[in-house]
Image (spheres, helix red, strand yellow):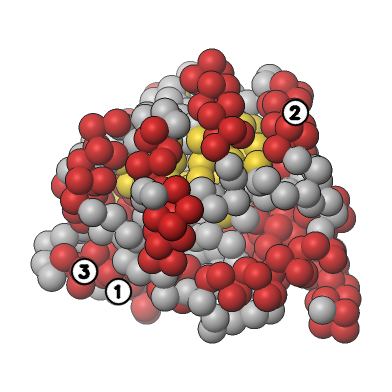
Amino acid sequence: MIIDTLITARWIIPVEPDGVTLEHHALAIDRGRIADLLPTTEALVKYQPRRIERLEHHVLIPGLVNAHTHAAMTLLRGVADDLPLMQWLQEHIWPLEQKWIGEAFVRDGVQLAMAEMIRGGITCFNDMYFFPEVVAREAVRAGMRAAVGMIVVDFPTAWAADADEYLRKGLALRDDYRHEPLIATVFAPHAPYTVSDEPLARIRTWSEELDCPVHIHLHETADEIHRSGQQYGMRPLKRLDQLGLVGPHLIGVHMTQLEDGEIARLAEAGASVVHCPESNLKLASGFCPAAKLLAAGVNVALGTDGAASNNDLDLLGEARTAALLAKAVANDATALPAHQALRMATLNGAAALGLAVETGSLTIGKSADVVAIGLEHIESLPIYNPVSDLVYAAGRQQVTDVWVAGRQLLKKRDLLTLDAAEIREKTQIWHDKLIHHS
């Protein structure tokens, strides 16, 4: 049988079924989808590929899903470090954004972010930022999968004047991209402290009508909980629950301040949580009780947050940090094992975004979103368990090849759909502007 591509690898970790590692297997890709997954010896007899990739020292995994980021903020990487969240936002990030944010900033910032993410094995990202139409356009150009946030805040920005305009523009964007297979749209009210009840209630109605996820920063800091108590007489999750937003569409990001009853409520509602361990550690926001959430049956995904508060978009690194941190927080070395951390970085992220039928595992019929990671390096040897090696020893610099929907975006560490030299040049121009005028 003639097919487009056959990738043979030393190991394949399909993520579904859970905990399985296949040795000397091959992935058959045709018309952008996974056509077969079978032993290499059988694959070479059964298929006549137009292209064959022989990866003798590599592990193949599903493309990583970065379930929460602000991609264009890569241009603010390192601009204001070592500060608590509200001081960081109010005194540094928001004033810079007010001054510089525009189509060009978002375009150049997203290109830099996608170049970094592709080189780190991320094939899909869930973005929350202004000018989402620019993010969607650039993702399609680069061949990356993106869930683009229809952002809403109460205050005016360069993109929109009020909640009405944010929603109107967001829904127009959703309409424009409804036939684009690489782009999903997600409601993205920024946070309970920046969006009032009326727009949140409208988002709930639209979310139910359009079967569309709602992506929001939630229970990120103790200060947020305290202020919500003062302003609304209740914790933010309870307020969202009263507005009808706590359900299977909810994607709560950070969730460092959770009581046991709230964990039970999230589980009962079928909501998802995005754990951003490194950003939370850096901003000293607190610890998301990932192991407790998983044990309760909550779908927990992983996100990097933006590069201004992380400061990298390294989801493989987040998986390691999440696994290590969960053990320390739970005081239990068996909490959040390596295979679960990998699932959080792939299938759980896809599930949170409503994309699990399309991506998140190497399953026949799904889109061929595939990452190859070389494990032959000194730093990774010897290999007793490839999943453990991947989560606890390997680094994103070992990602060699990346495909999205069967199209190769990275080949032997070289970007094929983005111009690395041009991105470096544009980034330097922004650096010089921001450093002189910030």
Q: Can you identify the residue that label 1 sits on?
A: 381
- Please state which amino acid type lies under the numbered disc 2: Arg
Which label lies toward us, 1 or 2? 2
Q: Residue at x 73, y 32 (%)?
A: 164
Q: Is 399 situated left or right of 382 in this image?
A: right
The label number, if any, that marks residue 329 in the structure image: 3
Query: What is the distance, in whole Å, between disc 1 and disc 2 at their CAs?
Result: 53 Å
Q: Position of residue 298 (x, y in %)?
A: 26, 41
Asked if residue 282 is positioned above or below residue 235 in the image, the reply reads below
- Taking depth in this image into account, of 162 and 343 the one nearest to the observer is 162
Q: Is residue 240 visible?
A: yes
Q: Secondary structure at mark 1?
A: loop
Comparing marks 1 and 3, which lies closer to the viewer?
A: 3
The answer for how far apart the CA atoms under marks 1 and 3 are is 29 Å
Residues at circles 1 and 2 in contact by the CB criterion of under 8 Å: no
- Horizontal side of 100 relative to 176 (left or right) equals right
Residue at left 81%, top 43%?
Answer: 161
* Mark positioned earlier in the residue sequence (1 or 3): 3
Residue 383 to residue 228: above or below: below
Disc number lying in front (3 or 2): 2
Q: Which mark is residue 266?
A: none
In the drawing, what numbered circle is on residue 168?
A: 2
Kind of residue at badge 3: Val
- For the residue pair 163 and 189, the one nearer the viewer reads as 163
Question: Which quarter of the figure is the C terminus placed in?
Answer: bottom right
Q: Which percent across, then down, holds residue 330?
A: 16, 65
Instruction: Please report whichever mark, 3 or 2, sits nearer to the chain's N-terminal start.
Output: 2
Q: Looking at this view, is 46 or 162 the one in front?
A: 162
In the rendering, at what x and y percent does residue 288 appear?
32, 60
Q: Give the side of residue 154 with respect to residue 355, left or right.
A: right
- Which element is circle 2 on? helix
> Do residues under tags 3 and 2 come within 8 Å of each other at their CB atoms?
no
